[in-house]
Image (spheres, rainbow, N blue to C red):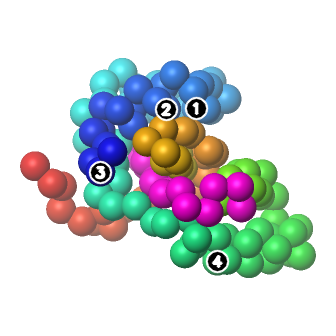
Amino acid sequence: MDKILNKEFFATIISSNVLAPYLQQDSNLRKLLKTPNHPDIHYPTSYAPAKQIKTGFKRRMNYMISKGIELNLDATKHLVDFMEEHSTGRIYNVTFNCAKQHYGVRCGLIENHLQVICVMTGGRIPDEAFGEAIK
């Protein structure tokens, strides 16, 4: 599985229900989830090998713990655990960029199986940060 289609990412994320906890508080997210081609859904154009990014996320997690930062701590732990268990996996990020915040859904690919790992949240990302849309 060299190229994962956007609709495959979308279907995997929807079927996982990982965004369900956020739907009550963000009506904009509900709108994004109606169609896989919404312009505020940003699909990955590449992946990161788990073995290459694991150390950075472990450092981030330890820093968050040491400073008492709760935002995204559980998600970061899930991601680190996933990369520990699947060091040969590929990590992808699908960003749902809503009016006031974004939801970054991390997915992993292991042996041609796409799996949702976690959701990391933050403020809205400026459109120009995503670069030009690929048509």
> Mark 1 touching mark 2, by CB under 8 A?
yes
Question: Dot 3 lies on which element?
Answer: loop
Question: Dot 2 lies on which element?
Answer: helix
Q: Which mark is residue 96?
A: none
Question: Is 117 inside the magenta-drawn segment?
Answer: no
The type of residue carrying mark 3 is Asp
Mark 3 Cα within 10 Å, few/some/many (few <14, many 20+)?
few
Q: Nearer the viewer, residue 106 or 30?
A: 106
Residue 6 locus on image (x, y percent): 29, 39
Residue located farthest toward the left when viewing the structure as drawn? 135
Q: Is residue 8 left or right of residue 101?
A: left
Q: Nearer the viewer, residue 102 or 42?
A: 42
Disc 3 versus disc 4: nearer the observer? 3
Query: What residue is shown at x 43% (from left), y 48% (from top)?
Result: 94
Whether residue 98 is visible here, answered yes or no, is no
Name the N-terminal-most of marks 1 and 4.
1
Q: Nearer the viewer, residue 126 or 114?
A: 114
The type of residue carrying mark 4 is Gly
Residue carrying label 2: 13
27 to 134, vertically: above or below: above
Magenta part of the protein: which range?
Answer: 84-103
Whether residue 4 is visible here, answered yes or no, is yes
Residue carrying label 3: 2
Disc 1 versus disc 2: nearer the observer? 2
Name the N-terminal-most of marks 3 and 2.
3
Residue 126 locus on image (x, y percent): 37, 62
Q: Which mark is residue 56?
A: 4
Residue carrying label 1: 19
Name the N-terminal-most of marks 1 and 2.
2
Disc 1 versus disc 4: nearer the observer? 4
Query: What residue is shown at x 64% (from left), y 70% (from top)?
Result: 54
